[in-house]
Amino acid sequence: MDRGESDRRSGIGFDAHELTVGRELKLGGHVVPFDRGLAGHSDGDVLLHAIIDALLGALALPDIGSRYPDSDPELADVDSRRLLQEVLGEVRLRGYRLEQVDCVLVCDRPRIQPYRDAIVSSLSTLLALPPDRVGLKAKSCEGTALAIPGSSLAALAIVQLASGR
Ligand code: MG
């Protein structure tokens, strides 16, 4: 690498969780009003999990399930924002900074559009990025085999890292 040239890395992440009664629906650290939430050993925040996996992938590290196994009782109902902050610390420790994130939520219900700005704002705060560097789209996938009405949510995320502070 030439002196002064920035080392750039990209990472991709994916996650899916079932919807279940009796839990809050947390997406990107924001609580979305709905009659069900996401099942999981942690708080089930599928969007943060996809972003965490993208960050780990950019660093070529093992995935979120290896780092935070669901057999660990210490991680029961853990706030995924805590896991994200730990992984962002790992990013900094290795000499990188997060420059951009882009995400897709695959979600038939609830409709995400009314909450989109609040989720982006939450992600912007959690990731220490300006909102114009946080992409978020929601796709219902209606009419296709990918749509599983009301039963689950999935998320994809891609991140861009650059070396330096
Ligand atoms: Mg997950």
Image (tube, helix red, strand yellow):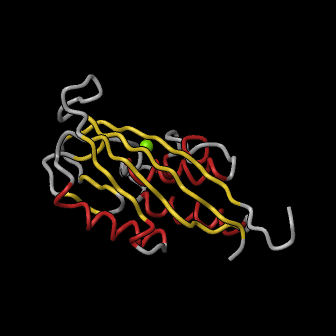
Identified at 19% across, 32% down, the residue is 142
Identified at 27% across, 42% down, the residue is 139
Identified at 51% across, 59% down, the residue is 83
Picture layout, residue 90 above or below residue 56: below
Q: Looking at the image, how many numbered discs can be counted on the residues?
A: 0
Query: Residue 155, position in %: x, y?
Result: 38, 44
Name the quadrant where ligand 1 sits.
Answer: top left
Residue placed most toward the observer, 90 or 73: 90
Picture layout, residue 4 above or below residue 71: below
Query: Residue 73, position in %: x, y?
Result: 49, 47
Query: Residue 120, position in %: x, y?
Result: 33, 65
Q: Quadrant of residue 154?
A: top left
> What quarter of the picture does the N terminus occupy?
bottom right
Query: Residue 132, position in %: x, y?
Result: 40, 70
Q: Quadrant of residue 106?
A: top left
Judge left or right: residue 57 versus residue 77: right
> What quarter of the picture does the C terminus occupy?
bottom right
Identified at 25% across, 39% down, the residue is 19
Residue placed most toward the observer, 139 or 91: 139
